[in-house]
Image: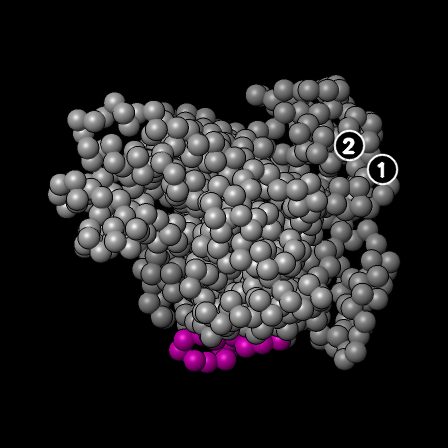
């Protein structure tokens, strides 16, 4: 009977409109919209990758080899399994233009079958085969416009790759398979594979990858084909990709970024939850007389609870529907605009998964933040009709409600961990939110007590005294203001500190620690001149060089490497390997023994200590590395410290020289120069003498990484901005709820002779004091969160980025001041006589 009665009461109250619930609705809508929008973008990219898998891959399947082309037997296997096969060589080299210009480029050398799937766009429009055929007895090439501009070329001009001259025939407008290029350090150049035979760029030991794209018969089971390739080409060291997951790294990146942004969105839900709770408390405070009347007419506590629980439920459903329309509708509506700016395809549509995810998060958040105010409402007594003290009971609600709240929090965290796929990040985020809310709550109590203590001492400064009275007096909105604004600022502060420290970690130590260049593809007979030239140059402070091969860790202790260390970067793709007879300079062994001079026994391996610990391997474990199609198995006999953060030369694996005897290879060198002028001279002389040598400018590479991090920080900042916007709405709600009390206060002050300027000053001072307190706590919490992420997740040094930190405090003051002044007009215009008569 009580459910039907409660539904009738709830329906009657809702007929009065949504007044008092606008902030409630706005908070729900924003929280749902933020999470739904991130999820829709994530699912759209996933759908695009799945829908255009073959086009992104360049075929139905791809076999990739390192350092070598397929053998005749391997090629026969591919041609027997596929309808058509296309061979591609991919590598970096220096492009030399007229007047000595030179730039790093990512070269794609293709055959006549390229592209198997999709279309390539070049300008002027012509068949790719005609462009690569060239003109005037020179092979042709197409380049991306950025590279053409850097080299100072025009269509028809000549340039050089290695020892081979090429004629620029067209601009490269669009590749059909851009996702297979990986992280390129230079713009793209496409040439014919046969044109490189005399260039010296693909000599034995050179750094390149060969990719064989396959067009398979319709209906081919790709999983079965992968198993067949693994069995029949065992030991070749190939990497298999197919249209089921054409861009695994892109898909994984999108998933991880989406998960992180969803967790940022949960911070927004927490801020919105503060607003939801405050809005409901304010609404229920105005309903005390109604509730007391219902209690006097025989309504029990369960009926009262259900009456307002049903109202909250109806409004939450409206907010969720509105949030889903906004969060899904905007990405779909702006889909063509967003897709044109994404580096991967995306199919924008309304996907169920992100809507379910956003709805679940929102339902749990609304329940968590409304349960306690509703529990207190049921404690209102009929005596509240006669005296206010007999109204709602303050303090903790009953034990069942506390337990229910804890269960709901546990369900929310479980859902977040499942949807994000990252339990550690979820727990860190939850801990940060709870810690920040706790710190802000304590700070609000401290500010209120300090205001009450200081007010009697400031009788000579009436405006400041009135401001302190409003903060510390009964009915103060200091707590919701500081909670809502402070948590939003905390998220922004943490993002700013993480971004700043990442940039500093990459670029801050560059002049002292990072080399100027990486020189790769140095042939053995070129090393004598190269070392003589640089070791006698007073502008060069240091040279490191080593032989280098690349191989794939295929097995660990005779088990597939990806089973032993799933997801670890060392077993994903090919890794650089070197050899050394004596322990290299600046190298420290942490365990085991070096093999010593003139060792010619069975292969031995020295492994990077930190990476070995992460992979769960150590001394005595056997590693099988496939190099140029040959498996080499060696036990780990020593572990070394390897500092990859220095951007210098570092190898995960070193082997004894006899283990790699006879394997064709080149050398790599790092050069530390003292000035940009010296760098330019070294680059020009080395590449002029040896066109096959590729020079990678470390500063350019780090700039690209920094730009990538900037884009990630921008995306995260947008997510954090939604949190701040939600906090601003909650702040407006608190100011609106406080307006009536401030109006009465202004009427009293005017009656006592206070000027409008004094009243406005007190309102502004109150806003500034609360903004400063919220900004200060947010600053401390944000710095703490930034340190934790930098130290435990990024493993980078941490320094407080003070410009960003101080901007947070200034932002807190500005936001509260604007909100306070926006609601100051009504109290200033109020006529004391009318207000005081209304309160009689």
Circle 1 sits on which residue? 557
Circle 2 sits on which residue? 617
Counting every numbered tag in the picture gives 2
Pinpoint residue 115: horizontal percent, then vertical percent. Answer: 59, 73
| Viewer-nearest residue: 671 or 23 | 23
The span from disc 2 to disc 1 (Cα, nearest Å) is 9 Å
Asked which secondary structure carries label 2, the reply is loop
Identified at 73% across, 59% down, the residue is: 240
Asked which secondary structure carries label 1, the reply is loop
**Quick check: marks 2 and 1 in contact, CB under 8 Å?**
yes
Identified at 86% across, 58% down, the residue is: 231
| Viewer-nearest residue: 625 or 751 | 751
Q: Magenta segment: does it hold 133?
A: yes
First along the sequence among labels 2 and 1: 1
Pinpoint residue 34: horizontal percent, then vertical percent. Answer: 50, 59
Whether residue 746 is visible to the viewer of this picture, yes or no, is yes
Q: Residue 227: which quarter of the image?
A: bottom right
Note whether 839 is above or below 581 in the view shown: below
State which region is magenta.
Answer: 117-134
Note whether 650 is above or below 370 in the view shown: above
| Viewer-nearest residue: 746 or 331 | 746
């Amino acid at each position: 009977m009580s459910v039907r009665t409660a539904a009738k009461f709830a329906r009657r109250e809702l007929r009065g409109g949504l007044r008092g619930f606008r902030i409630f609705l706005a908070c729900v809508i924003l929280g749902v919209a933020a999470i739904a929008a991130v999820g829709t973008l994530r699912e759209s990219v996933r759908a695009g990758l799945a829908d255009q898998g073959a086009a992104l891959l360049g075929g139905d399947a791809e076999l990739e080899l390192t350092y070598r082309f397929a053998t005749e037997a391997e090629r026969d296997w591919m041609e027997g399994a596929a309808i058509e096969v296309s061979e591609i060589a991919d590598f970096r080299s220096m492009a030399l233009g007229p007047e000595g210009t030179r730039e790093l480029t990512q070269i794609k050398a293709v055959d006549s079958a390229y592209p198997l799937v999709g279309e390539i766009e070049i300008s002027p429009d012509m068949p790719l085969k005609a462009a690569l055929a060239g003109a005037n007895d020179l092979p042709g090439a197409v380049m991306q416009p950025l590279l053409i501009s850097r080299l100072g070329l025009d269509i028809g001009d000549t340039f050089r790759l290695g020892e081979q001259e090429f004629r620029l025939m067209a601009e490269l407008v669009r590749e059909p398979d851009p996702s297979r290029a990986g992280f390129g350090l230079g713009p793209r150049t496409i040439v014919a594979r046969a044109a490189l035979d005399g260039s010296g760029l693909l000599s034995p030991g050179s750094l390149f990858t060969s990719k064989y794209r396959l067009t398979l018969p319709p209906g081919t089971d790709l999983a079965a084909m992968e198993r067949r390739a693994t069995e029949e080409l065992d030991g070749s060291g190939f990497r298999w990709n197919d249209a089921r997951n054409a861009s695994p790294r892109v898909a994984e990146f999108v998933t991880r970024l989406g998960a992180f942004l969803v967790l940022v969105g949960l911070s927004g839900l927490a801020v919105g939850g503060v607003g939801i709770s405050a809005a409901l408390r304010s609404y229920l405070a105005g309903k005390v007389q109604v509730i007391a009347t219902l209690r006097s007419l025989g309504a029990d506590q369960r009926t009262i609870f259900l009456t307002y629980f049903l109202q909250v439920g109806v409004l939450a459903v409206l907010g969720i529907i509105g949030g889903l329309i906004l969060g899904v509708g905007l990405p779909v509506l702006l889909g063509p605009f967003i897709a044109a700016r994404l580096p991967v395809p995306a199919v924008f549509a309304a996907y169920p998964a992100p809507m379910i995810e956003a709805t679940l998060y929102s339902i749990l958040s609304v329940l968590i933040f409304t349960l306690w105010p509703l529990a207190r409402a049921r404690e209102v007594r009929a005596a509240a009709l006669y005296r206010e003290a007999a109204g709602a009971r303050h303090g903790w609600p009953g034990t069942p409600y506390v337990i229910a709240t804890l269960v709901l929090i546990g369900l929310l965290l479980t859902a977040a961990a499942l949807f994000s796929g990252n339990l550690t990040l979820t727990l860190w985020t939850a801990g940060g939110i709870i810690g920040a809310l706790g710190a802000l709550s304590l700070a609000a109590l401290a500010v209120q007590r300090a205001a009450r203590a200081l007010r009697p001492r400031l009788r000579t400064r009436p405006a400041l005294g009135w401001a302190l009275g409003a903060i510390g007096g009964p009915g103060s909105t200091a707590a919701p203001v500081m909670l809502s604004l402070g948590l939003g600022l905390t998220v922004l502060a943490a993002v700013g500190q993480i971004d700043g420290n990442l940039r500093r970690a990459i670029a801050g130590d560059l002049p002292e620690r990072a080399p100027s260049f990486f020189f790769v593809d140095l042939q053995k007979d070129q090393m004598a001149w190269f070392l003589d030239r640089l070791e006698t140059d007073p502008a060069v402070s240091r040279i490191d060089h080593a032989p280098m091969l690349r191989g794939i860790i295929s097995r660990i202790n005779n088990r597939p490497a990806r089973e032993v260390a799933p997801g670890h970067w060392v077993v994903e793709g090919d890794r650089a390997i070197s050899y050394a007879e004596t322990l290299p300079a600046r190298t420290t062994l942490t365990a085991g023994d070096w093999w010593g001079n003139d060792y010619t026994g069975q292969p031995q391996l020295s492994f990077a200590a930190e990476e070995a610990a992460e992979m769960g391997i150590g001394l005595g474990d056997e590693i099988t590395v496939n190099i140029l199609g040959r498996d080499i198995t060696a036990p780990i006999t020593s572990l070394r410290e390897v500092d990859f953060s220095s951007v210098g030369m570092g190898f995960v694996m070193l082997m004894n020289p006899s283990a790699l005897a006879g394997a064709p290879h080149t050398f790599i060198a790092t050069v530390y120069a003292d000035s940009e002028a010296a760098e330019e001279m070294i680059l020009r002389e080395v590449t002029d003498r040896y066109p096959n040598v590729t020079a990678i400018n470390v500063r350019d590479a780090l700039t690209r990484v920094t730009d990538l991090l900037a884009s990630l920080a921008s995306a995260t900042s947008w997510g954090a901005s939604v949190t701040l916007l939600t906090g601003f709405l909650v702040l407006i709600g608190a100011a609106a709820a406080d307006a009536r009390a401030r109006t009465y206060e202004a009427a009293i002050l005017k009656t006592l002779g206070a000027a409008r300027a004094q009243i406005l000053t007190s309102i502004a001072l109150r806003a500034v004091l609360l903004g400063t307190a919220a900004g200060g706590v947010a600053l401390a919490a944000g710095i703490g969160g930034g340190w934790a992420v930098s130290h435990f997740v990024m493993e980078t040094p941490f320094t407080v980025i003070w410009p960003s930190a101080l901007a947070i405090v200034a932002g807190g003051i500005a936001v509260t001041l604007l909100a306070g002044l926006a609601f100051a007009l009504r109290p200033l215009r109020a006529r004391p006589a009318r207000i005081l008569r209304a309160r009689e």
